[in-house]
Image: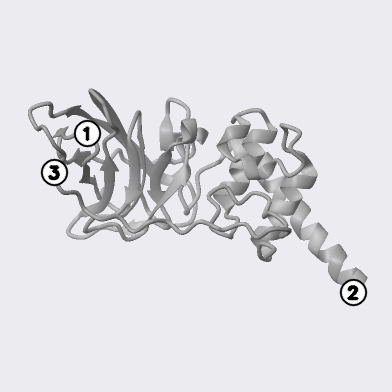
Amino acid sequence: MLSLMRTSGICRSMILIALVLVCGRAAHANSFGVTSLLFRSGGCNECHAGGQTPTVQLTGPTMVTAGATNEYTLQISAVGSQNKGGLNVSTTAGVLAVGGADAVNTQAVTGAAGRKEITHTAPKAAVDGVVTFTFLWTAPTPFSSATLTAWGNAVNGDAFNSGDRAASTTLTITADVSVATPTPTPTMIPTPTATATLGAPACVGDCNGDGTVTINEIITGVNIALDVSPMSACPPFDKNDDGTVTIDELLAAVNAAVGSCPQ
């Protein structure tokens, strides 16, 4: 019986890995959001298609003090049955974080160049015809300018990629050199990180060190294995420190995602 259970677990892991490998490039969009590591020029529309293009608006302070944290808002117009929305926001500099008045259904995940990006945890319903997301951006010190790039995806919520459509917008932010000292900034709740215990086994694939392995982190591992992403995108996948991600390391990450990270 124990042997059968182990065999079943291995089969489940192999099936999940196979699905990720097959779909990793051709259909990487999902209800939990993805990072720009999986984008090409078409952004969210690399996977979602068939719907009407929404109006997407990104607003917030465009002149800020170096080191200051400010709130930004992304709004996606609902189009017919496309009355739910998802997002991806990336930046050329500074730090993105979850926060603001409409931060529900958002998360910060590691994307291109090792920077945090904001994406959704699940499609968010429109209110009065508009889907609204907020997030925080902290300016680097020092800086002259930075650009936020946002994709807003209007979806119909039928669990398929058809009947959806996305649009993108950018917002350029410049440094306010007239202010001598930074103004008070909103307090961000720090993201807990796992503390390694001497002798305890590491959790393969736990890119952000939160003690769990998500589907987005597994996709990141697959992209590293396929040489789509650098090893620096998620060093915890390289359990044996050989500079590559092997199938055994991907399987270990899947097992951690299905079960739990070793403590």
Dot 3 or dot 1: first in sequence order is 1
Q: Residue at x 31, y 40 (%)?
A: 52
Q: Quadrant of the C terminus?
A: bottom right
Where does the image place residue 223, in percent across and percent down from the top left?
Answer: 62, 35
Q: Residue furthest left?
A: 178
Q: Quadrant of the N terminus?
A: bottom right
The amino acid type, in three-letter code, at marker 3 is Thr
Asked whether disc 3 touches disc 1, contact meaning CB atoms under 8 Å apart, the reply is: no
Q: Residue at x 74, y 37 (%)?
A: 241
In this rendering, is residue 232 above or below 190? above
Where does the image place residue 234, in percent across and percent down from the top left?
Answer: 59, 40
Q: Is residue 195 left or right of residue 1?
A: left
Whether residue 84 can be seen here: yes
Q: Is residue 74 left or right of residue 209?
A: left
Q: Hey, which quadrant is residue 104 in on the image?
A: bottom left
Between the C-alphas of marks 2 and 3, the distance is 61 Å
Whether residue 152 can be seen here: no
Camera-near label (2 vs 1) is 1
Query: Considering depth in this image, is 137 or 32 the residue closer to the camera?
Result: 137
The amino acid type, in three-letter code, at marker 1 is Ala
In this rendering, is residue 8 above or below 183? below
Q: Which residue is mark 3?
A: 183
Where does the image place residue 123, in percent across and percent down from the top left?
Answer: 38, 56
Q: Which label sits on residue 2? A: 2
Q: Residue at x 58, y 60 (%)?
A: 211
SS at badge 1: loop
Q: Which residue is mark 1?
A: 66
The amino acid type, in three-letter code, at marker 2 is Leu
Q: Is residue 168 left or right of residue 160?
A: left
